[in-house]
Amino acid sequence: MLSEGRTELIDFFDRNRESLVREWENQIVISNGDPYKEKIRLNGIAIFNIVLSMHTMSDQELLEIIQKHALEISEERALANINIGDFVYNVNLGRTVLYSYLSKSGLQWSDLQESINKINYCFDKFLYYAVTHYTEAKNKIIEEKTMFIDSTHQDRLTLLGQMTSSFIHEFRNPLTSIQGFIQLLKADYPNMKYLEIISSELEQLNFRISQFLLLSKKELIGKEKEQFHLNKLIDEVLNFLYPSILDGKVKIKKEIADEITLYGYADEMRQVLINIIFNAIDVLNHYRNPNPTIEIKSYLDNNTHVILSISNNGPMIPSELSKTIFEPFFTTKKLGTGLGLFVCKEIIEKHKGELTCSSTPEITIFTIKLPISASPL
């Protein structure tokens, strides 16, 4: 049995229901791109109806209907991708409008205290359930989008792997023949101009093709792991890149530890060094540093690993890009493939190592950590 005060309050709200909703509707924040904006009025009416009928339900029934509406509405808000602050503002605006009408009811404030407590309970519980579910719904949406992107990305990589593994050897066969004839020409005509340049360009082409082959994660037939000297490999790479170093007027500084023997795929490690050092040369050429310098340092770490760092004094890599430079297809070059550093990381990790990058306004350092072993890994 409702008390006389509660009956009067319900009658008052029933008489003013339409004008109450209209006043609330005229003040709420609605985004133009909200796909559910036509339902906002209905949602507001649903919340007001809960409040107006709160005295006719048990606490458990009231809590259940509040939770039901809160979950439904917050799901819509999450899908609409609206600002959660706008949502909370609109709900609390409804509470303010209710209080404004209470002040016009003519009822004694002391008689309304219990109803005010109940109204606060309804709005507080509604906001709690709605905001909590909104956060969970948004996280779920983000997770689903991330899974879709990852899946699409993986499909792209798989397709690229299938493509490269099917025709990469068709590229290599004529390339090998051309390189063979170049060697014959060198033997017959040792003073012929441009043969060294042609040979060097073919080596660069072979290197680029190898990047795509490594991206497909297919091993070359008959390829074997071997022991190789890191210092010798560094010297070979610097000799190979010498024309680019000379053209860019880049100064090379070396601070190399005593001879270190590694075990793995020497040709792949050579590609890693070529890629990182060539990128540094390219950056320094575009940066126009008056004293372009690349430093190559190595040292032993607890006699179990070698730390090799390759640094340049070019521009700083922005912090927002430092986390993505090793991602496939990421590039800042107009003609870049975005595969170079990704392939480098794949190779280093294949050798049970780590490849990281740190950058400041003064220096950018690529650090390689590899296990050393006198026997097969």
Image: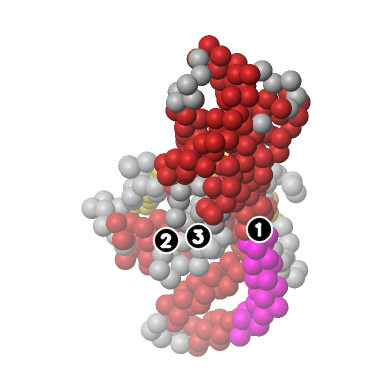
Please report the residue visible at 58 percent of the width from the left and 47 percent of the height from the top: 42
Which percent across, then down, holds residue 298? 50, 42
Q: Residue furthest top?
A: 110
Amino acid at circle 3: Phe
Please report the residue visible at 31 percent of the width from the left and 61 percent of the height from the top: 286
Q: Residue furthest left?
A: 290
Secondary structure found at label 1: helix
Secondary structure found at label 3: loop
Dot 3 corresponds to which residue?
330
Q: Earlier in the sequence, mark 3 or mark 1?
A: 1
Q: Does residue 303 show up?
A: no
Which percent across, then down, holds residue 92? 50, 32
State yes or no: residue 154 in magenta: yes
Which percent across, then down, holds residue 313? 34, 47
Dot 2 corresponds to which residue?
332
Amino acid at circle 1: Phe
Closer to us: 143 or 247: 143
Query: What label sits on residue 148 in the rendered view?
Result: 1
Q: Nearer the viewer, mark 3 or mark 1?
A: 1
> Looking at the picture, does residue 324 appear above or below residue 104?
below
Q: Does residue 16 show up?
A: yes
Please report the residue visible at 73 percent of the width from the left and 23 percent of the height from the top: 59
Please report the residue visible at 44 percent of the width from the left and 55 percent of the height from the top: 32
Q: Earlier in the sequence, mark 1 or mark 2?
A: 1
Task: Specify start and end residues of the magenta stretch as a single range.
Answer: 151-174
Q: Nearer the viewer, mark 1 or mark 2?
A: 1
